[in-house]
Image (cartoon, rainbow, N blue to C red):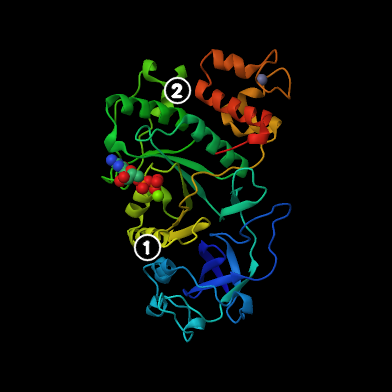
Amino acid sequence: MKGLVVRNTGSWYDVRTDDGQLLPCKVKGNFRLKGIRSTNPVAVGDWVEVSPTGTLPNNDAAVHRPPSSSDAAVHRPPSSSDAARDPRPLSNSNAAVVPDGSPSGPPAFITNILDRRNYIIRRASNLSKQSHIIAANVDLACLVVTIAHPETSTTFIDRFLASAEAYAVPVALVFNKLDLYDADERRYLNAIMALYRHLGYPCFAVSATTGEGITDVPATAPMPTAATVPDEATVPDASASVPLLPLLPYLCGKTTLFSGNSGVGKSTLLNRLVPEARAKTAALSLAHDQGQHTTTFSEMYDLQEGGRIIDTPGIRGFGTFDFNRAEVSHYFREIFAIGRDCRFSNCTHTHEPGCAVRTALDHHEIAESRYRSYLSILEDENESKYREKF
Ligand SMILES: Nc1nc2c(ncn2[C@@H]2O[C@H](COP(=O)(O)OP(=O)(O)O)[C@@H](O)[C@H]2O)c(=O)[nH]1
Ligand SMILES: [Mg+2]
Ligand SMILES: [Zn+2]
């Protein structure tokens, strides 16, 4: 039987099978990625083959699923048949259920992972050699950021974008908390959105609290003047004058990973996009109170309008991979493009004569904030012993 992994807590995976059942599974077999030591062989977003008739090894018999997983049936798309409403999988339907709702019968097993289109991985912890696969088969990574309350640094944004370039995962920037910004912050918001839109990254301005910008076009703020543009970069007005679009229609039909610093409003936004998620978030905090182990937790939600959102509480970014010094500029679109004109093909754009990138910087054709972010990643290389990518 084939299915989609929609939730991962520790060594348990919830798989939504082709027939709409939600099956709690463990992993059987060795699915190591080549050359990577991963804490989780299977990830949310993976298409897998499951064997519902698997038997549980004795030493695992005492493992129960966390209580919050008992309401996992909310994953169902609204069109699911009545039969699918039973949160417990058919194969386990006669298994004993312990008082916390955990199935105690033999679990199903994931026996094969179908080819991944892509996957997003991060180091399990700083300085760790192990990696954690955050999600697989992602169409879009949404980086939720805020201009203030709290401020997301441009370095953080640029590092995220560079990692996404390296993984070839498209990124959209979602500027949240639009309702909180004063006139100055709005001007800064417009300038920074103009910068990233010019680089080709779709930008959205929303308020998860009021709903502005989610299904409707956000109220337009005044365009920036040169004086308000961050870091003196000349922001081309052609891309800036394209009207902003609402977020939700853009997410329809895509599998989107949500990322961003804590406090920027990811959960609030998720709850607005997927009303079903509200109950889940509450269940999760309950699980936290009970000391549940939720560090390797990812979950996929269905958008009613079509498409899916992968939420990764506790993971604020991705990209803890080793940038090769010579490659860093490949992941900054404009630096890569302009760098083709440097005198030396292996120019690092730091000190070399005939560097087209530094000339462009002098002429304000590259934003200083972008160049600073580029340098900060190069510096990581120099002190790789204490590297912390995000
Ligand atoms: N004013 C305002 N507050 C927001 C908005 N989005 C989130 N918040 C608040 O910001 C805080 C952090 O939100 P949360 O969703 O928990 O952020 P997360 O850590 O990224 O999941 C909460 O107090 C939210 O109520 C917004 O658009 N406007
Ligand atoms: Mg949150
Ligand atoms: Zn150069």
Q: Residues within 10 Å of mark 1 (few under 14, many from 20)?
A: some
**In the depicted structure, whether residue 347 falls above or below residue 320:** above
**Of residues 220 and 232, the one drawn nearer to the viewer in this rendering:** 232
Question: How far is disc 1 from disc 2 in space, using C-alphas?
Answer: 46 Å
Disc 1 versus disc 2: nearer the observer? 1
Residue at 47% in and 30% down = 154
Task: State the mark number for residue 283.
Answer: 1
Judging by the rendered image, the residue that carries numbered circle 2 is 236
In the visual, does 28 lie left or right of 239?
right
Instruction: Choose top left, top right, bottom left or bottom right for residue 304.
Output: bottom left
In the visual, does 301 lie left or right of 63?
left
The N terminus lies in quadrant: bottom right
Image coordinates for residue 261, horizontal then vertical, percent = 45, 41
Within 8 Å of ligand 2, the CB of disc 1?
Answer: no
Residue at 47% in and 75% down = 21
Image coordinates for residue 299, horizontal then vertical, percent = 47, 59
**SS class, disc 1:** helix
Residue type at mark 2 is Pro
**In the depicted structure, whether residue 254 falls above or below residue 260:** below
Residue at 69% in and 13% down = 354
The C terminus lies in quadrant: top right
In the visual, does 381 lie left or right of 204?
right
**In the depicted structure, whether residue 150 falls above or below residue 41:** above
Work out whether residue 175 can be spotted. yes
Residue type at mark 1 is Ala
Q: Earlier in the sequence, mark 1 or mark 2?
A: 2
In the visual, does 212 lie left or right of 372?
left
Quarter of the picture for ligand 1? top left
**SS class, disc 2:** loop
Image coordinates for residue 63, horizontal then vertical, percent = 54, 73
**Of residues 61 and 41, the one drawn nearer to the viewer in this rendering:** 61
